[in-house]
Amino acid sequence: MGSRRTDGQSGATLLEVLIGVLLASAVALAVGGGLVFVTRTWYGNQARLEAQQNLRIAVERVVRELRLAGACLPRAGEIPALLPVQGTDAGERDVLVFRTNQSCAASALRATYGGGGGPIQLERVEGFAVGMQAYIWNPRTRSGEFFRVAAVDVVGQSVTPGADTPVAGRYPASESSVMGVEVQRYEVGERRGVPELRLHLNPDLPGGVPEPLARGIERFNLRYVLQRPYAAVECVAGYTLGGGETLCVKDQPSELEWPLVRLVQLEVWARSTRPVPGGGGDGFYRIQQGDFSRTPVVVRPRNLLHGDPRWEERP
């Protein structure tokens, strides 16, 4: 006959099974909750770190490039289209434009240019390169045109404008000149609900579009220190130099005041690209560099006011 199981050999009771299930569920919930907490903390820390990195990228890039504004260009104000620094006050999202000629490409014309898309004969072509932006200027008529360099002839000492940027005016040989110009335009836009600082390189040429530079930049405020005494009636603040002189600070200089810009002040805010634990009222983490009321970021472009001395003898 087969053996029979006694009561002492019976399996777990229903109560024991239920208790085991409850204990296992509690452990699973605890582990799951801990995992969720760790994951949220990790993502929050990553979002904060990303915001800090984006702020650093934005400020360092603008400061580094802005210091070169006006390099190898004529004195500020001599050529209206080539002002070293300009901007637009747009509340908390200002627009900054500055110009430079880092390759120091510049030459007078050695033959009159009458348009038509042919090569422009120069005295020298050092510094000019295919694809760069250039500006041809006639000081007598105080007019000029931007164009893209399509070809550089080192032997024939000439540059040829691109077909998409033909030069239409007439430029006499003894007076006119051509110089390289790089224009950088910084502005804040939004993509998929996230603000970002954008860079538009050479906006005077066709085909270019603003490119994202740093995500999460939601405030980009600018002020300009002018080379003129502070007057409360027209200046938003004063900036005191080491010698005790106090200069005028403006949010938006007039067209006649742009050549007087000596320093640029920055106030930049970045936020996380997604809500984080412990964020502000809207859930986002924010970080700031520069404060107009206390310690703004101050940039002194090296070439403002005086310009490149090599242009002093030009017509």
Image: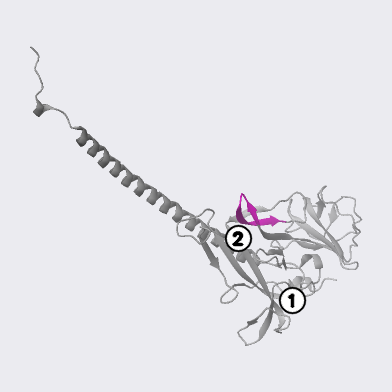
* Residue farthest top in this picture: 1
Relative to 247, say whether 61 is above or below. above
Residue type at tag 1: Leu
- Magenta span covers which residues? 189-201
Give how far apart the Cα atoms at labels 2 and 1 are: 29 Å
Residue type at tag 2: Glu
Q: Quadrant of the N terminus?
A: top left
Location of mark 1 (residue): 260
Relative to 50, say whether 238 is above or below. below
Location of mark 2 (residue): 218
Q: Secondary structure at mark 2?
A: strand
Query: From where the camera sits, is residue 23 visible?
Result: yes
Image location of residue 161, percent across then percent down: 82, 52
Front-lying residue, 110 or 212: 212
| Callouts 2 and 1 close, C-beta under 8 Å | no
Residue 243 falls left or right of residue 150 = left
